[in-house]
Image (tube, helix red, strand yellow):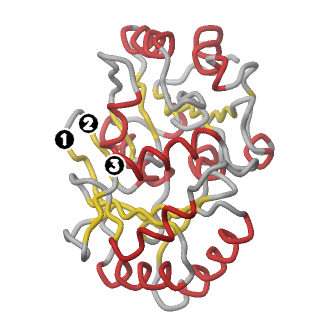
Amino acid sequence: MEFKPKAIFLDMDGTILNHQNKVTLRTKEIIDELRDKGFHVFIATGRAFEEIEGMVPPGFQVDGVVASNGMVGYVGNEIVFKHTLPFELVETVIKKAREHKVYYELFPYGTPRITLKQDQAYMLDEIRDPKPESVGINEWLSRKKAIKDEIAWKEHIEGSEFSKFYFFARTKEHINSWKKELEQLKQEIDFTTSTSSEHNVEIMVADVNKATGVQQMLKRFGLSERETLAIGDSDNDLPMLRLVHYAVAMKNASDTVKEIVDEITKFTCDEDGVYHYLKRYI
């Protein structure tokens, strides 16, 4: 690869995160090395900003983070940009999720994710063992951890600023039915949906995605898409990968991602694929 980027955006799940939801020390060290050489390295993830610290090695640092699929951007702890789901949308979606018995997590800014107590029974049923074969182990472990440690079970919705909804179903039929319901709801309330596996879908503000977040972060640093490389693996990375000058898919990426990129890594996320790619080419 002859292209030498000034900015590098890295997805988390399936990219720098292995299937045990951890970033390896080698990946941290190559990021440190790149930043020491003057490259700007960023995270662009569907995860909430607050989730990142528990998944990375001590001392892990990047120049900025685009979180919640482009809904918010951070440089250090400073918020560079932020979008908020309309409260009307939040109320409507929770009601419809309950009607369809769809597992959901609502992410307020700065506080634990919320699920209402009245929905706890069917939520627990959705993540009962055994794990469905088609569900990725990283997503399954994340749901188990969320149910046990991370969800705040509330009597009613609390807060006024929300970064996203995350929905999960143990069967593809269930989540696909829910996606159709969301498409119908878009006729009444405008919003954006994004998926990162065959068993989930997320909701963000209309016209917001990883690409819009990357654009805002680049503007903050005086950089352009022409100077940017991005690495990802799933469908929620597509807007970002189409935006940048040089797009790279993980070896474990979905076929739809591999079809649109300039290059594919030689190793998967469980084989430190990002480390090997950056070490060899950058």
Res 35 quadrant in image: top left
Mark 1 lies on a secondary structure that is strand
Rendered position, 126 above or below 75? below
Rendered position, 84 above or below 230? below
- Who's the residue at 43% across and 8% down the image? 33
Near-viewer residue (60 or 157): 157
The CA span between labels 3 and 2 is 24 Å
The CA span between labels 1 and 3 is 23 Å
- The answer to whether residue 34 is left or right of residue 19 is left
For the residue marked with disc 3, what is the amino acid? Glu
**Disc 3 residue crowd, few under 14, some 14–19, many 20+, Cα 10 Å:** some
Q: Which mark is residue 150?
A: 3
Q: Which mark is residue 78?
A: 1
Where's residue 3, x and y in %? 63, 21
Residue highlighted by disc 2:
75
**Disc 1 residue crowd, few under 14, some 14–19, many 20+, Cα 10 Å:** few
**Circle 1 or circle 3, nearest the eye:** 3
- Who's the residue at 46% across and 53% down the image? 69
For the residue marked with disc 1, what is the amino acid? Glu
Q: Are marks 1 and 2 in contact (CB under 8 Å)?
A: yes
Where's residue 174, x and y in %? 68, 71
